[in-house]
Image (spheres, rainbow, N blue to C red):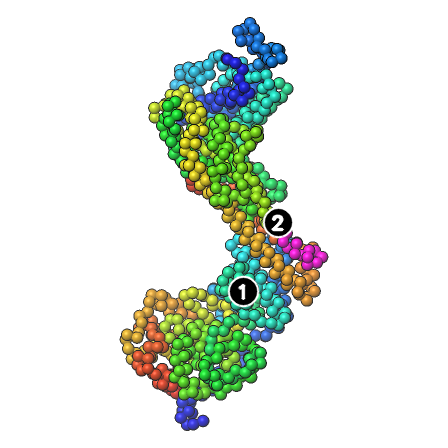
Amino acid sequence: MGWPFGDDRAAMRILNEIQRVMRLIMLLRRQRGCKGLKSGEGGLMVVLWNSKESYRVDHCRPLLDVSGAPMGTDLVFGSIAAAGPWCEGFATGNLKPGFTDLIQKLFPSEDQGPEPDQEELCGFTHMHGPIHLLISFQVKVAKQFDRQEWPFHIEAFLHKLSLTNARVKIHFSCKSYQKRLQRIFSGKIQCKLTLKDQWSTFLDVTSSKPGVSVGERPWCHGGHPVPGERVSLSIPPAAMERGLYGELSLQPVALLAPCVLQYPNLATRLTHIQVEVYGPSNVPVASPTDFLQQLSVHLNCEELGIDGILRWNDPTDLQPRGGATLPVEAETGPEGGRSLASVEQSLTLLLFLHHMDPFTSELYDVIATEELLEHHLEAILTNNRQAVTAALQREIKSILNAHRRRSKASERICSAFEVISSSALSIVSSSSNLDFRAACLSNMRVRDTHGLSQALREAQVRVTSWKFVPKARCYPVPQVKEHITTPGHEPKAVLYIFTIPL
Amino acid sequence: METGQQEQFAEIDKLRDELLTNIKCDVEPPKQLDSREVLTRIENVILGMVATLSKDEAPVLVLPSRSDWANVSFDSAVGLQMIAGSSVTTVRSDCPLSVKKFAQIFKILSIIYKLVQSNSYATKRDIYYNDTQLFGYQRAVDCIVDDISCMLQVPRRTLHVLATSKGFLCGDLSYLEGDGSRVNCLSSSAAVPVSSNVAGIKNIVSSAKFVLIVEKDATFQRLIDDDFCSKLCPCIMITGKGFPDVNSRLMVRKLWDTLQIPIFALVDADPHGTPLLSYMSYSTQQNRHHTDCEAMSFEAHSLTVPSVRWMGLLPSDLQRLRVPQDMLIPLTQRDESKLHSLLRRPYLASQPSWQKEMDLMRQNKVKAEIQSLSAIGPDFLSKVYLPNKLRYGGWI
């Protein structure tokens, strides 16, 4: 096994195992030609737990720390199980003869670990049916591993995985020393996404309530992903030397949340841009990329119409790996506060990598190629900096068009409100008709014209901001429909959208 | 008066007698609104807005549609008038596309309120300069003032907003302006601009036998140069320099009300000149830029003179006078469709002779300007054409 690994690399090792299992499942599904709604459902269980053992270099002399005490190492055990229609028939039929060999190659016996607790497996099979794939592994970690936040990285990774595999319920359990972490990832509102030359994927577009100010008003519970234009990427020489060939491209998909389409006058404020990268098998990239972290430096915020400055992640912040979160720092504007009600929105950019190499067809080679691709991702993105930045700029600008329009509309309305209020007030103030004045004040429940001015403004903002125009494509409180999108255009047909209860 | 003059105006005098006899006694002018009523109507709009907001609903202004022919009815004694239950357009305050217009309307309402309250006046130009950023263009103010007139269902002049006059007068006429200044069109060597405050004009003195409305300023100037008003004295000439503005129309109506003399129109024999005729008579206007059949309908009683007679240039004159072919212009497709549209107007039913002339224009497929008469002779218009028309009753 070698010397104990550092915390960071151990977390990466665990992530890599999960990635490898997921890639295997996704590629096997494609090989089987899995289509149809039901074939995408199922469950994925990821269980992690640890144990202590002392480590001996030569099995005779213990390793000592600086104080002279024996240095301890831990083992983190992991099991990944898959059940349900989405992985049915992997080890049967035509696949069976090569399947066992493939598993052996991907997951060597020396890295295999014990199976998880049977009780935990029972609960999983009870929910999703018999397990079709179970991989167990172990990873050596340093003694101080328990003090780190490594489960957070795993959890974040699984969350990203669930975003593009919304029909698979992901059960995550981590028992580390005195800590126990359990999460279930499942898509409430799902949207089927079909990109050109790629398999369909189900995105979890569940969206949170747009702030407390919405109150009891109806709101859209999901987002509406917008596919962008595909960008061809050139493979740098270093990656080619390592065996990465073929055609490589990147397709962005943008998702603004929460959706406020039904409130055309509601102003919005972008709080951050989240960028996530997915490999050709639709598995999230786990390696960090400086390119994405520093994307804010290369994007033109003014052209994008963002009201603020796009920052980048502080490397010391505990952020999930593989993607980037670019917060928008609001610019301090002039005092006034005269604006319509607004909600905060976030923009998620999903970058799907697409790779085609006609000379790579064996599953093991495909998985290895994808791992190589991830390994060289930083260099690939850097090598295509201009094209990628321009593409992202274009997509962000396009998706934020609505935001800019709202901004302009909001300004227009606010500016008009000032005139309307002051004109009405001017007439009320100068009128000698006592009945008229009294009626105006009593309607707005105020005592004087000063109060009337304030009340009129507040009422105008309230009434106009929350003007509701229902949209057929929005997701009301639980219904059952399915929504299909095509690349770069509005949906060809809206059939039905369905929800999967937790 | 000399015998020659008596003969010159014999037909005109006959026409005048006929007009005076035919004035319908049962057509009463609408009750004049006092300023308090105008203020109350504005207050009702404001109260409506406040009441709507208090119910957490977005205020909406409802404006009668000014371009829908279905919203007017025709009375031969008055002209076009608005009917109840007309189609409307709405201006919403919660829509970014219409909120600006909503604000413009409220702004102008507040300005009008102050003007009426203080019994002062302002021109549309003054209102525009009050807030050029809000209004953008002068035309926006012009349209909204008309919209407010329709919305409140009051005559334009009760809003105390004056239009800038572009018309001119000359001839046997003198009067006192609202500010007390005396105007004598006869003594002035040049034409006198039409007053901006026609309603304020008093003490009109004239012995004119007729009023001649001249469409084009060029023709008007030509007649002045030819000393037409002296040769065919006593008479009054007025021009709106194209389509007459509100003040020019008010002036014509005021002259009719005060002097009760025939009013003749001298327009081009084309599909654009004839609508001017109906505009002066019945308060309608339709040209390729603007359809506004109802804009002035509240003012019909003070703006229209249904007894206006078409003196020339008649399409039948072109044949009768043998106007040279090279002065005749073929009708374009647009001209023909406009003519077709004019022939369907309700007021033409009461003017069969006008209809006949327009039919002739359509059949011959040619049009001509008044200037075409100069091809017959340089002074033909002032020395032959008009004097003969007046002497022998060549009007319809």
Q: Amino acid at mark 1?
A: Tyr
Q: Residue at x 61, y 53 (%)?
A: A460
Q: Residue at x 50, y 86 (%)?
A: B206
Check the image and name the residue furthest to the left.
B325
Chain letter of mark 2 equals A
Q: Residue at x 49, y 30 (%)?
A: A290
Vertical side of A170 occupied by B289: above or below:
below
Residue B175 appears at what percent x and percent y?
53, 83
Q: Which residues are magenta?
A: A446-459
Decide whether residue A105 is among the magenta residues: no
Q: Which residue is mark 2?
A: A335
Camera-side residue of B279 and B107: B107
Quadrant of the image occupied by residue A117:
top right
Q: Amino acid at mark 2?
A: Glu
Residue A205 appears at what percent x and percent y?
52, 35
Camera-side residue of A98 and A393: A393
Vertical side of B386 occupied by A193: above or below:
above
